[in-house]
Amino acid sequence: MKIAILPGDGIGPEIVDQAVKVLKALGEPFEMEFAPVGGAGYEAAGHPLPESTLKLAKEADAVLFGAVGDWKYDTLDRPLRPEQAILGLRKNLNLFANLRPAILYPELAGASTLKPEVVSGLDILIIRELTGDIYFGQPRGVRECPDGPFKGQREGFDTMRYAEGEIRRIAHVAFQAARKRNKRLTSVDKANVLETFQFWKDIMIDVHKEYPDVALDHMYVDNAAMQLVRAPKKFDVMVTGNMFGDILSDAAAMLTGSIGMLPSASLDANNKGLYEPSHGSAPDIAGKGIANPLATILSAAMMLRYSLGKAEQADRIEAAVKKVLTQGLRTADIFEDGCSKVGTSEMGDAVVNAL
Amino acid sequence: MKIAILPGDGIGPEIVDQAVKVLKALGEPFEMEFAPVGGAGYEAAGHPLPESTLKLAKEADAVLFGAVGDWKYDTLDRPLRPEQAILGLRKNLNLFANLRPAILYPELAGASTLKPEVVSGLDILIIRELTGDIYFGQPRGVRECPDGPFKGQREGFDTMRYAEGEIRRIAHVAFQAARKRNKRLTSVDKANVLETFQFWKDIMIDVHKEYPDVALDHMYVDNAAMQLVRAPKKFDVMVTGNMFGDILSDAAAMLTGSIGMLPSASLDANNKGLYEPSHGSAPDIAGKGIANPLATILSAAMMLRYSLGKAEQADRIEAAVKKVLTQGLRTADIFEDGCSKVGTSEMGDAVVNAL
Ligand SMILES: CC(C)[C@H](C(=O)O)[C@@H](O)C(=O)O
Ligand SMILES: CC(C)[C@H](C(=O)O)[C@@H](O)C(=O)O
């Protein structure tokens, strides 16, 4: 089995190194091939997603991704900026289903800005559609405003859209995920204002007929943002579109206070996937050896489970991560008095030892 | 001066009654005229925003609005649903600037789900553009998908758009508000993905030239949602579009844990405005006399300040509200041990006495 390893920018390379270390320690015959992406892709080949990197990602059985982005690329034209690599990979690999667990490890309850009773034991799964919506809809651009009080002025515009099949396939992913958990699914929409999301809601209701054992409810996106702050533990699985999912999954991750712990998976229809930590490239601490590698290591575990058919190895990694937390090891981002502060590479070694 | 009073549905009438009581106690010669809106408009005239209600709102110098919505209208066709009244009033009265303070009263610090040190003293102002964006953009609807892998299927679609003049006018409102506060403005966009918001950002940077005394920064909407949870006190004034503002202003309000305390103003270019509490119609507790009227009373204070040129009377009301909190009076939503629980009307009376 072949894994494409795309470390990217900022802390990407150092955290990916730890995940690779852990993967190697499993003793499986994985072939791992590295390629540059994001700013590193731009430096190497003049493009954030070089042809050869895309080719490798397509060939591989799974992609392990670090993080991309650095202030120094902020002045590039948009198509050359690092984050275009993520959008390009999602679209080209058809990775339409983004799974983002927001889990609060009991050992890290203190890291949250929320009161312990509100978040302790938090375990929700946000499923975000990832290849449709206003992210990719055409037409888009800057044009002359065609009518209304601003007629003749310049206007920026984009198209939000979801086709029936796009909604159906993400609905199936969400209902199936809910079935494996507590059988409750919240579909987040803005059906009171948007045609796209009235349509979304109608299709969700229709697909629900095939999953009578799962309880489905509908929530407006503004209310969902409130409920995540008010009572996040009421959610089990949440499914929503690309744009709303971008916002809500980040808010949910931050509820835990330990975004350095949260993995994510982006899957196609055949369970091929791209796996990356939920956090960014943190250029301010890059190269200092202090970044938390656990989100990336846990992303590798998700990869083993979803794309490589190695659920037991995934369990082993997750158990090892819990063990190092119990041992009191903490990187700086999750450090608390009474724990032992360790660096990126020490944390990676500790997980390997705990395997 | 004429005030249109639109109580609406659910708890709307009872909370608006208290604000009217307080306004009357000021001894100003206000003319107040009542009209039905939302579900009440539908019952009275077959439409959530009856002609006569719209006419009154247009004629008046300001509108005091309660809340609209009730489950029993959920099955109506969308154009007849209560919330269409809000959208109709915003659009017809050109209320493009929505001002939503998120303030945590020291007396209510315990009501928040966030840790006291994260939110105590919170005082941010979210300015949401209210008549543009994907809320009103055309075309929109359900059509046959014109291209791509889902060609020929049905698809729901909407148009996001902002014209230059629309962005400029909300930018001016935001910079001027920041100038009166701590001179820091955060413009929230998604310029890394959306053409509309790259354009938005460009215009913000341009308008900033006229306000060199205000510090402007830019933040992606997903990051803004995270930072609101992580360190909300870092913000002073935030400005964003209609859709992102819908989500972020509700999240910000919920940070305080006391959304029953938060007023809002929606202004046109001449400071005519509609004033309403940030919370909804809460049909589950309607008619029980337990709803918190303070957000509506504080909305009336905003109305005095922004639309009616009576800043001193606004100050009086705000001071009276602080006083009743200090006295330990609490409605059920913000009740804590050691305080005195009061009903809607008692709370209104207490504010009148404290004036
Ligand atoms: C970098 C950006 C394009 C991306 C997105 O908006 O999807 C990021 O925020 C994410 O959530 O992965
Ligand atoms: C009721 C709804 C149309 C409205 C909106 O989305 O603007 C509401 O959520 C609000 O924020 O006032």
Image (spheres, coloured by chain):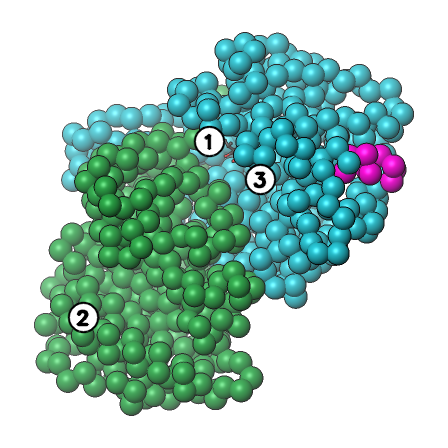
Chain colours: A cyan, B green
- Residue A157 at x, y = what percent? 32, 31
Tag on residue B48?
none
Q: Report if the beta carbon of the residue with label 1 is closer than 8 angstroms to ligand 1.
A: yes
- Residue B110 at x, y = what percent? 53, 72
Q: Is residue B182 above or below residue A330?
A: below
Q: Which residue is mark 2?
A: B311
- Amino acid marked by disc 1: Tyr
From the viewer's perspective, tell me whether residue B90 is left or right of residue A179.
left
Q: Quadrant of residue B14?
A: bottom left
Magenta residues, as a range? A347-355
Chain designation of label 1: A
Question: Which residue is found at the position 26% from the left and 78% from the top?
Answer: B317
- Amino acid marked by disc 3: Arg
- Confirm whether residue B87 shows in the render: no
Mark 1 secondary-structure assignment: helix
Looking at the rendered image, the disc whose residue lies closer to the viewer, 2 or 1, is 2
Q: Which residue is mark 3?
A: A128
Magenta span: helix, strand or loop, mainly? helix
Q: Which residue occupies the foreground of this view, B198 or A209?
A: B198
Counting other residues with Cα less than 10 Å from the Cα at mark 3, is it few (<14), some (14-19), or many (20 or more)?
many
Q: Which residue occupies the foreground of this view, B123 or B19?
A: B123
